[in-house]
Amino acid sequence: MSLSKRALGVSPSLTLAISAKAKKMKADGLDVISFGAGEPDFDTPKYIIDAAKEALDKGFTRYTPASGTVELRKAICDKLQRENGVTYDINQIVVSNGAKHSLSNAIRALVEEGDEVIIPAPFWLTYPELVKLSDGTPVIVELLPENGFKLTPEQLRKAITPKTKAIILNNPSNPTGVVYSKEEIEALGKELLQHKQVYVISDEIYEKLIYGVQTMSIAACSEELKERTVIVNGMSKAYAMTGWRIGYTASSTELSKAMGSIQSHSTSNPNSIAQYASTVALSDKQGEKFLKEMNGVFEKRRDLMVELMAKVGLPIIKPEGAFYVMVNVKSLFGKTYDGAKITSAFDVASIMLDKLYTAVIPCESFGADDFVRLSYATGEKEIREGLSRFEKFVKGCK
């Protein structure tokens, strides 16, 4: 079989083997604790589920406009104005099959062969692959601990070339959990205003999961920058709707039209029932109560994980958002555990799963070779037991 260069150029994820093995071990009855989850461990709120049932009862099961229903796009516009201080009309909103699909639409609409896209590292592992699938070139900018693992205006300035088409900014960040302050966003925005050809793809999917800090959308910096920004968001993380597959973009009218056209010829419209439920999710006041409660639970788990990681004895990046903790495991390289040699973060993850039935995610595919990622989208009991096993692992390394 002769596959395309595009298909062959996509890198396999190192996390897939760990995740698949952990699931099989658990299915076989082993006491596996997984810190790999990239989704809230909450049920979708009842009022949203009831809205989906209502959609079915009403026969809302046919095609919708390719870019989403008018009602949902209006609800998104209202949300962006109310919560983010940015104004869009419904023709500037494209609803897609999850935020990953929204990212794909944005990159496909903007990037072509020879274009560069700046991606701060650590990054969500899908970003470079989406750029490569559009024949673009990912330009990785390594973030530094002394800067809190955040991109600085100086780093951004040095990374921009005449070939730069866009930057992907993830705030709050997966996998680090860092959150850019309003001042830091404004500083990046000020720098980007000097580079008229550069677009911003602003992935804000974790915006509702922030603990004790404040941030802003970079689109709110100025009208000029807003015209070159694609806000990417969705329902999955904020409303525990990962399986419902609803994401969206907000951008200039010209770019939204292009993304809508691409989508119309690739997937057509997103799920009609999920769109109906998402409209209710964004509009009903019950959502505020759910978001507050879920955020409180995640903040408590974050604090517990940070406290227990101090006993494990490895450096971490303390998260201010999302639901991940990144752990630096470089000090374990060259050691052995129960006869198994450790040479990489992937080895750490593999050995912990094999020997201690604990699944963590190696971060080589996230642009952070010395780290593993732990999700605290799991119960307090599992966090305590899993980190007790992690401590046992670290102390057993010789």
Image (cartoon, grey):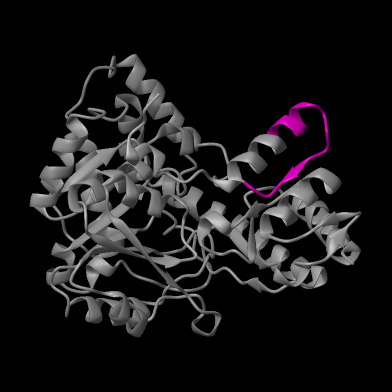
> Which image quadrant for residue 61?
top left
269 up-or-down from 252: above or below: above
Residue found at x 28% / y 69%: 218
> Which image quadrant for residue 311?
bottom right
Residue found at x 33% / y 40%: 5
Total tally of numbered discs in the picture: 0
268 up-or-down from 240: above or below: above
Position of residue 258 in the picture relative to residue 233 (left or right): left
78 up-or-down from 228: above or below: above
Residue found at x 87% / y 64%: 397
Magenta range: 23-36
Q: Does residue 29 belong to the magenta stretch?
A: yes
Q: Nearer the viewer, residue 333 or 125?
A: 333
Residue found at x 74% / y 48%: 350
Position of residue 13 in the picture relative to residue 199 (left or right): right
Q: Nearer the viewer, residue 89 or 219?
A: 219
**In the current view of this chain or complex, which residue is farthest to the left?**
254
252 up-or-down from 242: above or below: below
Work out whether residue 325 can be spotted.
yes
Q: Nearer the viewer, residue 232 or 87?
A: 232
Which x, y percent locates residue 190? Answer: 23, 81
Q: Does residue 291 belong to the magenta stretch?
A: no
Which x, y percent locates residue 221? Answer: 22, 74
Work out whether residue 90 can be spotted.
no
The C terminus sits in image quarter: bottom right
The N terminus sits in image quarter: top left
Which x, y percent locates residue 150? Answer: 45, 75
**In the current view of this chain or complex, which residue is farthest to the front?**
2
Position of residue 150 in the picture relative to residue 336 (left or right): left
